[in-house]
Image (cartoon, coloured by chain):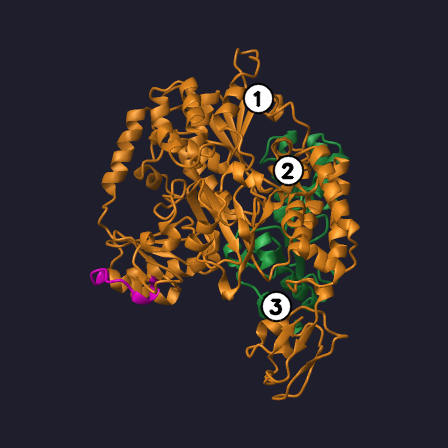
Chain colours: A orange, B green
Amino acid sequence: MPRLNSIPELEKLRAECVAGSDAQRPCLTVCAGSGCSAAGAEDLLTALRKAVEKAGMKDQIDVKSTGCHGFCERGPVMLVWPEGTFYNRVTASSAAEVVASVCNGHKPVEKLLYKDPVSGKKCLTEEEVPFYARQTRVLFANNGRIDPKQITDYLRVGGYASVAKVLGGMTPEGVVETVTKSGLRGRGGAGFPTGVKWSLCRANGKPNGHGEIERYIICNADEGDPGAFMDRSLLEGNPHSVIEGMIIGAFALGAKQGFVYVRAEYPLAVKHLHVALQQAEELGLLGDNILGTGLNFRIRLVQGAGAFVCGEETALIASIEGRVGEPHPRPPYPVEKGLFGKPTVINNVKTWASVGHIVNRGHEWYSAIGTEKSKGTMVFSLVGKINNTGLVEVPMGITLHEMIYDIGGGIPNGRSLKAVQIGGPSGGCIPADLIDLPIDYEQLTKAGSMMGSGGMVVMDDSTCMVDVARYFMEFLEEESCGQCFPCRQGTQEMKAILTRICEGRGKEEDLDTLQDLGWLMKETSLCGLGQTAANPVLTTLRYFRSEYLAHIRDEVCPAKVCKKLIVYEINPTVCDGCGACVKVCAGTAILGEKDRAHKIDQAKCTKCGACMEVCKPKAVLVS
Amino acid sequence: MATETEVIPEILAQFDQTRSSLIPILQEIQNQYRYLPQAMLRQVAQKLDVPLPEVYHVATFYNCFSLEPVGRNLVQVCLGTACHVRGAPKVLDRLLTDLKLPAPGTTPDMEFTVRTVRCVGCCGLAPVVRVNDSTHPNMSQAKVKGMLKKYYSKPAAQ
């Protein structure tokens, strides 16, 4: 594609992209995000292409792979355009049927439609599916429509229009003002006002020998929170929206070089971003003299090497510089002294992607969404013990109840909600009785948790809260960089205490020690990792103290999770002697003849619970 | 495979010879060799003019680097929060039992290396195990044996 040398040339190309795509032409878009890919999306795509060819419709029907549609639970999912018919759990074997239906007047394939489990009604389009109906999709609006590997697709849906708007007549100050007025706050978790961060960075820096002030911008895509994958899905599904935000940021901040720091654990995101950067460079949207306006800006892709602490901004900077990811105390903040000692703005993937929308649609539009202090939409990954797992984009201020029951479809297997863990290892567990809590930065902090990057792990009554606290502490102990004493020793000690409690060897004084250690780490750790490390422990202590006491006083794990405190048994009156458990037993602990009731040898039982998983008549009991 | 002395200049040529190229260079070596051979670390230190202890510091700090050779198949058990609450620890235990490994590591026949990872971002399909480039969704203890079977170089070795 030829390089674009002016804004009118960009608009001309966009007009060509729009004209070149017949809106009425049938198109099959298959979600090829990591989730659906693992569920077989690639096979489905191949099968669809073959079926189209076989039907002789290669020139009439398009087949496209897109980014994540969000409804991972029902993957692979796909849409049939122009109607937008939504199919779920589509396997390669159904490909021919889908293509045949398109050829025969678009009569939907009934069996692939989503059936609302509450009303029993079949849903034709995404809008009819309750999971989508309650969402406000801004950042993820185009994920199911565009091929992330085609910049023309992004242009067709209005991509890079905000870059044209900014370069066509806005001042850097004007851009910063728009972002400030929108009320956008950092989507990485801490919620610092983005416009304020940009203003601070602009106020810093000294001119070099050429009279230029060197500043850098960084996109933090080191999404390390276990249980969060929205940044990954955005980079996989719509990488240009992030690049667009960064170009605007470069203009506003006077940065010539930007970096995207992505986890290496996200190979597809790396690949799509790489392609997107290349295409943007070819079109002259990155590089020297962007659109003939004199703006010079490049973006380098940096892959993380697997360290949770690198999500912390100073550690991330160290990592880009080729050093170990050890944070340094702030101040100086990166906006004063960041990458290579120069003023630097680091924003999260979703923050950058929001910028284009704000510029395009105006700060009034953005600030009308959300609550008084938390504006706009937030993307959550709704996972764990929930019926509809997936990615959810909602306006700030939505209640947990709406998230879990209206969008998430409630708790599976007839179990009850116990807690919601929000914000990853730095966040906390919010108990079921706070379910009417509106979700915004302030409310979550008040409840002892935090927004974090938006991981939302739902836990039911079969989840042990002490075990969850131990899990996070084990994670943080491993990921602590070890530089400062309170975090290094604190996480080790807390893990040891929690392990003891899980094994029924805890003492009541341990709870006070945990509380004290938590306070100490919060006050004295060097970086955010250590300062928030105690949150999962402190919130579970605050809301689930009785569960800790049950482990300590009665040596009982009420959720029947902690191995040392549970016993598996087979109910002889229910067991039909099928032998399925014998095959899976890890410790050859199950005895019994075929068709006769079996028995577990407690001395050999490793408490793996595999027998319970496979037992059809549900004869295996845990107590 | 080319010898180490041939590979290093080739890899180095892809990057600026600066400090900030250290991690990308090590990542490239890790990608090609699946571990970081000691001799290569020495050469990288020399070429980039970074003290060897610092190169080791970086190589041991980040999880994606390994100083030990990795088995023919890399099995990564996700221990993210969603996977944890949906039973990932049990899947890990079963995997280790089946491979007769006392802890995550490499089997003596070099067929498998088991590692734990914190979140591969497939939380909707938890628990997941990634073997080489394939992601196995909705894992259970009962599925472990069948999954491993697919990856043995010699089926009879089982």
Q: Which residues are magenta?
A: A103-114
Secondary structure found at label 3: helix
x 42%, y 44%: residue: A394
Disc 3 to disc 1, C-alpha distance:
51 Å
x 36%, y 43%: residue: A142
Query: Residue A232: x and y, percent?
Result: 50, 45
Query: Residue B138: x and y, percent?
Result: 53, 62
Disc 1 vs disc 2: which is toward the camera?
Answer: 1
Query: Is B13 covered by the magenta stretch?
Result: no
Which quadrant: the C terminus of chain B?
A: bottom right
**Circle 1 residues within 10 Å: few <14, some 14–19, many ≥20:** many
Type of amino acid under label 1: Pro
The chain under label 3 reads B
Of residues A81 and A419, the one nearer the viewer is A419
Q: Which residue is mark 1?
A: A343
Contact flag, marks 3 and 1 (Cβ < 8 Å) = no
Disc 3 to disc 2, C-alpha distance:
37 Å
**Is residue A452 in sight in this rendering?**
no
Disc 1 to disc 2, C-alpha distance:
23 Å
Q: Which residue is mark 2?
A: B23
